[in-house]
């Protein structure tokens, strides 16, 4: 068994490098660990088995969250909690929004949209379409840049 006394500075450096690249051998070298008659692999294995280093590594790694099971009923229940909390705080905007969303999920709200078109081009005559286009052209501004420099055509010679 390798006897390496805990060294906060070197242990911290080891954990930091290990978390950066996942290479325990590189972490041993960059943290400055050297133990006579032991290979860097043995030192790395020893350090990775130390409880304080294991704890530091696991605390630094992102937590994997369990998948959330979202159902219509769970959403309605969560919205009820939002409503209750908002009402306790007398914050009516989120309370109303929660109730509206609950009603929508329960099928109690029906949203109707009416889409209208000003012009039905299919039923217009050619003259009406040309007149419409000409009226729109008056509102348009020509922003085409003037040609400058090489390649400019000055007309017939």
Image (cartoon, rainbow, N blue to C red):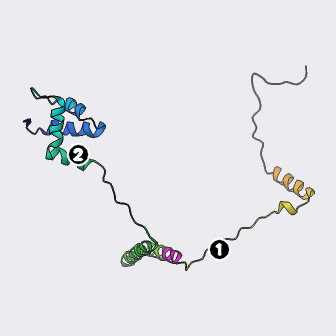
Tell me the quarter of the image containing the N terminus.
top left
Pick whichever, 11 or 138, lies toward us. 11
Q: Secondary structure at mark 2?
A: helix
Q: Residue at x 84, y 60 (%)?
A: 121
Q: Residues within 10 Å of mark 2 (few under 14, many from 20)?
A: some
Distance of label 1 from label 2 (alpha carbons): 55 Å
Q: Residue at x 75, y 21 (%)?
A: 150
* Residue behind mark 2: 57
Kindly report the secondary structure that dominates the magenta region of the rendered protein. Answer: helix
Tell me the quarter of the image containing the C terminus.
top right
Does the magenta portion include 102?
yes
Residue 112 got which mark?
Answer: 1
Residue 103 got which mark?
Answer: none
Q: Position of residue 126 (x, y in %)?
A: 91, 56
- Image: magenta residue range: 99-105
Q: Position of residue 99 (x, y in %)?
A: 47, 77
């Amino acid at each position: 068994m390798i006897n390496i006394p805990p060294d906060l500075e070197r242990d911290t450096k080891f954990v930091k490098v290990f978390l950066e690249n996942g290479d325990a051998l590189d972490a041993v070298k960059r943290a400055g660990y050297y133990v006579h008659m032991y290979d860097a692999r043995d030192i790395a294995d020893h350090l990775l088995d130390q409880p304080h280093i294991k704890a530091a590594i696991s605390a630094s790694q992102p937590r994997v969250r369990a998948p959330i099971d979202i159902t219509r009923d769970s959403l309605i229940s969560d919205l009820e909690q939002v409503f209750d909390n908002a009402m306790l705080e007398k914050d009516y905007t989120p309370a109303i929004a929660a109730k509206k969303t609950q009603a929508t999920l329960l099928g109690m709200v029906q949203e109707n949209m009416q889409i209208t078109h000003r012009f039905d081009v299919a039923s217009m005559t050619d003259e009406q379409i040309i007149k419409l286009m000409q009226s729109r052209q008056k509102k348009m501004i020509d922003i085409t840049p003037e040609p400058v420099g090489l390649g400019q055509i000055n007309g017939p010679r």
